[in-house]
Amino acid sequence: MSAGPPVRAYSTKGRDMNKLVCRWLLLLFLLANLSACRKQEPWKPVVEPGGFDYLADAVAEALDAHRALADHLEKGDREHTLQALAQSRHSLLKLQRYYIPMTEVRQMVYDADRLYFLRRVEESGASLEKAKTLLQGIARTDGPGLEKEANQVETKIDALLAAMQQASPEVSELFGSLGHRVNLMVLKGDMVLAGARFSEER
C-alpha cells in the first residue's frame, strides 16, 4: 500500500524533465536562427569599381578643343577656327549626352542593387525605371551602334524588372549581367561613341 506516493513524485519529475527539454529545444532553435542570420553573405556590388578616369579624359578632351579654338581665333584662321569650333562642340556634347547620363545610369543600377538586397523592392524598381529614361535619351543620339547599345541595356533592365516582380531566383544573375554591361559602356565610351553625331535640335 506504500507504492502511491513514489508514483506521484515520479510524475512531477517527469513533467519537470519535459519542461527542461522543451526549454533546451527552444534555445537550440533560437541559436540556429541566429547562426543562419550571421551566415548571410554580405552585399557585393554588381557595378565593379572603375573610377572616373573616363570623365576626366572627356573633360580634358573638351578643354584641349577649346584651347585649339581660342588659338585659331587669335590667329584669324577662319578655316581651322570652324573645325576647332565643331570639335569643341562635339567634345562638350559627348559629356552632356553620353558620359554624364551614363554615369548616372551606373549609379542608379548600383543603388537599385543595394536597395533590392535590403528588400526595398519598389525603390529598387523605381531606380531602374529612371535609368531606362536616361538610356532612351542616349539612344536618340545619331551614331552607328550607340542606339543599339543603349537599347540592349534597356532590354536587360526590362528582364530584371520582370524577374523582380516574380521574386525569381535569377534576379542576382540578371543584376550582375546588367552591372557588367553598364560598366563597360562607361569605361569603353570611346568605342561606343565611334562615329556618333549630335543634333543641334536636342
Image (spheres, grey):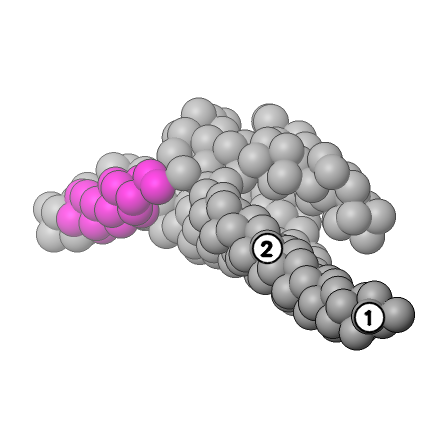
- Secondary structure of the residue carrying tag 2 is helix
Taking 176 as reference, is 122 left or right? right
Q: Nearer the viewer, residue 6 or 95?
A: 6
Tell me the residue that label 1 is attached to: 2
Helix, strand or loop for the magenta stretch, by majority? helix
Could you say which disc has been placed on residue 153 in the image? none
* Image quadrant occupied by the N terminus: bottom right
Q: Amino acid type of disc 1?
A: Ser
- Picture coordinates of residue 78 (x, y %)? 25, 43
* Number of other residues with Cα within 10 Å of mark 2, as a class: few under 14, some 14 to 19, many 20 or more: few
Tell me what residue is drawn at x 76 percent, y 68 percent.
Answer: 6
Looking at the image, the residue that sits furthest to the front is 1
Taking 4 as reference, is 77 left or right? left
Tell me what residue is drawn at x 46 percent, y 31 percent.
Answer: 184
The magenta-colored residue range is: 49-69
Whether residue 149 is visible, yes or no, is yes
Q: Can residue 125 be found in the magenta stretch? A: no
* Image quadrant occupied by the C terminus: bottom right
Tell me what residue is drawn at x 79 percent, y 74 percent.
Answer: 5
Quarter-of-image position of residue 108: bottom right
Tell me what residue is drawn at x 40 percent, y 38 percent.
Answer: 48
Report, in whole angstroms, how far the alpha carbon at label 2 lies from the one at label 1: 41 Å
- Picture coordinates of residue 186 (x, y %)? 43, 39
Q: Amino acid type of disc 2?
A: Leu
- Secondary structure of the residue carrying tag 1 is loop
Quarter-of-image position of residue 142: top right
Q: Earlier in the sequence, mark 2 or mark 1?
A: 1
Taking 66 as reference, is 143 left or right? right
Tell me the residue that label 2 is attached to: 28
Q: Can residue 65 be found in the magenta stretch? A: yes
